[in-house]
Amino acid sequence: MSAGSLVIQKYRNTASDLVVRFCLISCSSQTMAAVGMLLLATLSLYALSAVCETTSVSVEIHTDSVLHTIDDRSPQLKTLARAFSPCILRIGGTDADGVTFTPSLQAPNVSNSVLTGHVWDEINNFTKDVGWDLIFGLSVLQRKDGHWDPSNADQLLDYTSQKGHDIYGFELGNEPINLPDHYNTSISGAQLGRDFLTFHDNLRKRPYFKDTLILGPDIFHIEKGISFMRDFLTSGGALSVDAITFHHCFGNGKEGRLADFTDPVFMDRLKVALDTVCNATSDAPAGTPLWLGETGSFFDHGVMNMTNTYVDGFLWLDKLGLSAQSGITKVIRQDFSGPGWANLTSTIRRR
């Protein structure tokens, strides 16, 4: 391959399977590009088969766009979604903390801040039909006297059980250390741990949800949230969650460069984050799973014309390999549908 060189590094996953890490160093001809694409596809399949016993990959839709992307009447969207099955759909994100459930409003598209019973039915009908499991993020900003107020969540739980919808998991809040940036408020790690304990007790008293997972705390920038995570776990979080979740992106999409996608030093930022989260969660009960609960290459909708193209495969495949090596059991990719970084590059609109 005189037009370029491909460096392949192999190392052994601690769970026993071989995973592959690779980086395209240079590629200047169409021939090399074609060979590289074929090799990437082959290695992608190999690496996915290597990590599948320990790490599963799922997708996300942001709460603010769910009214426009989930349509249980769309045969095209269902066909595309079934290709991902088995899969978990996580509905969450920044706007999840601003959503209120209202079972009585039946008309769809009332407001992106209101989840109606009609839309909730539509979401659940869609996931059931395509063979997906559903994770939904509840608002942690439903509060009273400084504590989480479960009354609105109770309405959603009552409605869900009455309708017979099967929920794989619930989250409570999203990226809590970033709340001041988005909602001009803050919740300490210790208080969030107590809030999760309230949610745990509230959910577990309902036999219908005995198998539904509680997931959290969805910390982004774990290097800034080590003490927050520890306070959360020691104040009730460790007794409440079935899996510990954290988020990761390599950087801001407005600052991403093409060279970043094939730079091993840049890729190793994830290794630092994984080591940090393992250290920060040392107070959790032994065996508590770690999930990469929201991830992509770059946040803020990715890097234009890069994160939704072939070159993003290098960062993504490396992320799968490192996650499996670090014992991460679930990886939820951002997004299933939407601009910039999505698995589907355009929204299938309602008829």
Image (cartoon, grey):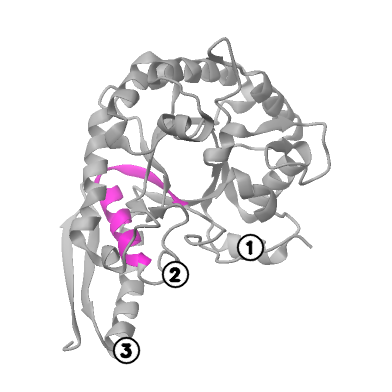
Residue on which disc 3 sits: 30
Q: In the drawing, what numbered circle is on residue 347?
A: 1
Q: Describe the element under mark 1 as helix, strand or loop.
A: loop
* Residue 139 belongs to magenta span: no
Label 3: few (<14), some (14–19) or many (≥20) C-alpha neighbours in 10 Å: few
Residue 254 sits in quarter? bottom left
Percent x, y of residue 205: 60, 16
Q: In the drawing, what numbered circle is on residue 305?
A: 2
Under mark 3, the amino acid is Gln
- Magenta residues, start to end: 312-333
The label nearer to you, 3 versus 2, is: 2
**In the drawing, does residue 17 fall left or right of residue 307?**
left
Question: Is 323 situated above or below 83?
Answer: above
Label 1: few (<14), some (14–19) or many (≥20) C-alpha neighbours in 10 Å: some
Under mark 1, the amino acid is Thr
Label 2: few (<14), some (14–19) or many (≥20) C-alpha neighbours in 10 Å: few
Q: Who is closer to the viewer here, 170 or 304?
A: 304
Q: Describe the element under mark 2 as helix, strand or loop.
A: loop
**In the drawing, does residue 137 fall left or right of residue 42?**
right
